[in-house]
Amino acid sequence: MAIRNVRKLGDETLETVCRPVKKMTDHISELIDDMLDTMYDANGVGLAAPQVGVLRRIVVIDVTGEDPHVLINPEIIETQGEQKCYEGCLSVPGKMGMVTRPAYVKVKALDRDMNEYELEGEELLARAICHEVDHLDGIMYTTKVEGDLEDMTPPSDDEDDEE
């Protein structure tokens, strides 16, 4: 398993529609492991294969840090409601923007054993599913941002020193 380089906004790979996965191979299995390692290493909640330069319809998501989901050839089959929240992306480091997404999503996908399953998600999981599936269609969240992208400002260590 390895940490892969995450492609950044402006890389043509991120604007390309990905091809479906037809069968599980050693290469695909290794890619999934590397994607999980890369996502965790970058403190992300999701990662799509094009973000690591592979034009295949594969997504990994883990919004809790303890429950990873592998979605191969995912297809959103149901959405409900609406939520508006700040979103970021490992391919757009240091930036975030307000995006409206469904509050509930149901997705049909294949697991890493190529068995079909459905995953339902609300709030952050719903947002992550939509965000990552968009990547597979060459769509960056930056095209959906309402208003301007903003700088993420981590808390300053100096604030703890103030009395």
Image (tube, rainbow, N blue to C red):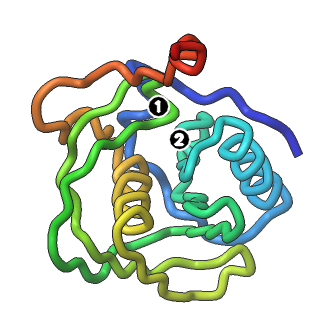
Q: Nearer the viewer, residue 45 or 22?
A: 45
Q: Which of 114 and 120 is in front in this view?
A: 120
Please give the count of numbered marks on the rendered protein: 2
Counting residues from the N terminus, which is met first, the one under dot 1 or under dot 2?
1
Q: In the rendering, at what x and y percent does residue 38 appear? A: 71, 41
Q: Residue 54 carries which label?
A: none
The residue type indicated by label 2 comes to Pro
Residue indicated by mark 2: 50
Residue indicated by mark 1: 13
Q: In the rendering, at what x and y percent does residue 105 appear? A: 32, 76
Q: Is residue 136 placed above or below 62 in the rendered structure? A: above
User: Residue shown at 20%/35% (left/top)?
Assistant: 143
Q: Which of 4 and 44 is in front in this view?
A: 44
Helix, strand or loop at label 2? It is helix
Looking at the image, residue 114 sits to the left or right of residue 61; the answer is right
**Distance from Cα at disc 1 to Cα at disc 2:** 6 Å
State if disc 2 and disc 1 touch (CB < 8 Å): yes
Helix, strand or loop at label 1? It is helix
Q: Is residue 139 placed above or below 97 in the rendered structure? A: below
